[in-house]
Amino acid sequence: MKGGYMDSKIANNRNILIAVDESENAKRAVLYVKDLLAGLSGFHITLITIIPEPPEDYFMSESEKTEWVKDNFVSARRIIEGYHKIFSEAGFREEDVKSHAVMKKCASIAECILNEKDNLACGTVVIGRRGISKKEEFIFGSTSSKILHTAKDCSIWVIE
Amino acid sequence: MQEITQTDQKQFSREELRERIAHWMGPERVPKKFSIITDTTDFYRVDYDDVVILGEIPYLIRNNEREGRFGIDDQQKYWVKRARDLSDGSVKIIKLVFHERFQSKVGGITFDCFRSPQKEARILDLTKGHPRFMQGFALKDSSNNVIRIIDYIRGKTLADAVLKYGQDHEDYFYNYFPSIFDEYMELVEAIRFLHEHDDKHGDIRRDHIIREEGTGNSRWIDFDFDYLHKENVFGYDLFGLGNILTYLTGRGDVTSQLLQQASSPLISHLTEHDMNIIFNNRVVNLKKVYPYVPAELNNILLHFSMAANVFYDNTGQLLNDLNEARVKLNKP
């Protein structure tokens, strides 16, 4: 790959996007990648956490929204910094591990993750599977299933 | 975001208001004492016989509206008032501002829910003139509260209306259900219209469809409810549509308890796969109970069963299947 990390928008399988949240399955995904790639060179990892922005209607005032955004960014950064540390302690070079917290209006979190995958030219997406019940999948949908069914031009690793 | 302009509240003398009340309600209904209210923030203080002035129009407040929910009938909704428009005598429903956030549990699944006057105001604007939605408008009171003024729909819920059709289920299914099915499809089309405009109804259930006397139009009501969705933004709306279709097909809920009470031999043929995915006592595989239900229709119902592996993502998919099923609903 010419240029620096993420300079090109051409997806590279060695550019790995790990979508995380506060759940145990996200942690498992992080640990899996860490164990698999520790000691190998040429891989670039981006940890991303998506904060789905509630609809405007949710907030009673602008100040309430500002407070909500601030609190959620603080939590999100705490999560990804914790995961970032796991890679640092495993010997990954600082320049090979990036982390982002992104707040977006998401009709679908899966779509938001895949958009970020495109923006960051990642050829591999890693997600943990929540193991939700059939009822929950029916009502709320499953992010990992949607990613599996809609992702294009990339590899998907689903960590159980 | 829709801008709701604040209009100045017109001034009315007490004498003028008394005259208007006497004109529309009769002289005997003029209250001896009443408050004139322009700020509705504290909706508990907006009481029977008070006059609320919103914009150019005074409204005489009548009773609080009530709603049955979660098996509890007649819960008073203190923020929803029935009223008489003192400019033309029409009956209105006035919805005052009540922000609430709460967790609701349906079938063991927890939802983060909230009530939003802005959402309802936006949908009223979007669906103006649409025959399948309640009609009304929003404006702000003197304290900037977004008030919705809704035309009162005289009529029964669609769910109550269908219960009296047919001498038995077979008679109902062949002679009444096809036109009810058409009505249902139009209601689903109406929800598709909302979804295409990035809004959800938020609280689709059978008592939120009122069949208007006179026109016979069934209309969706109550749009102020919302929930924080996860992966599938419209999942809960679609679940509600599935429940209503099941109810209409069965001419009421067919539950395992009802079959047991009737000592029906069918009970031994039912498995958990025949039941609603969330409400596990409701039969959705209605072909097992009523064999003349066409497979095309039954297959739609099975999308809402414990056995389902494929779910509807959007109303377009549901409508495609409904169209196919419709062809099979003619008389035998």
Image (tube, coloured by chain):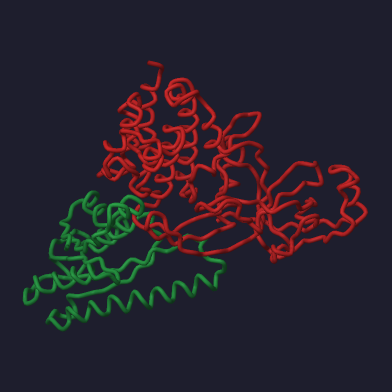
Chain colours: A green, B red
Q: Give above or below for B278 relative to A113.
A: above
Rendered position, B141 above or below A31:
above
A137 sits to left or right of B130: left
Q: Residue at x 46, y 72 (%)?
A: A68
- Residue placed farthest to the bottom in the image? A89
Identify the image quadrant of residue A12: bottom left
Is residue A1 shown above or below B294? below
Image coords of residue B203 (percent x, y): 49, 50
Looking at the image, which residue is at 31% across and 33% down?
A: B265
Task: Residue A61 in the image: state x and y as whole percent.
Answer: 57, 69
Q: Residue at x 58, y 57 (%)?
A: B118
Left or right: B257 as drawn, with respect to B94: left
User: Where residue B262 sits in the image (x, y, percent)?
Assistant: 40, 35
Report x, y in % for residue A136: 32, 55
Q: Quadrant of the N terminus of chain B?
A: bottom right
Q: Along the line of sight, which residue is nearer the eye, A92 or B291? A: B291
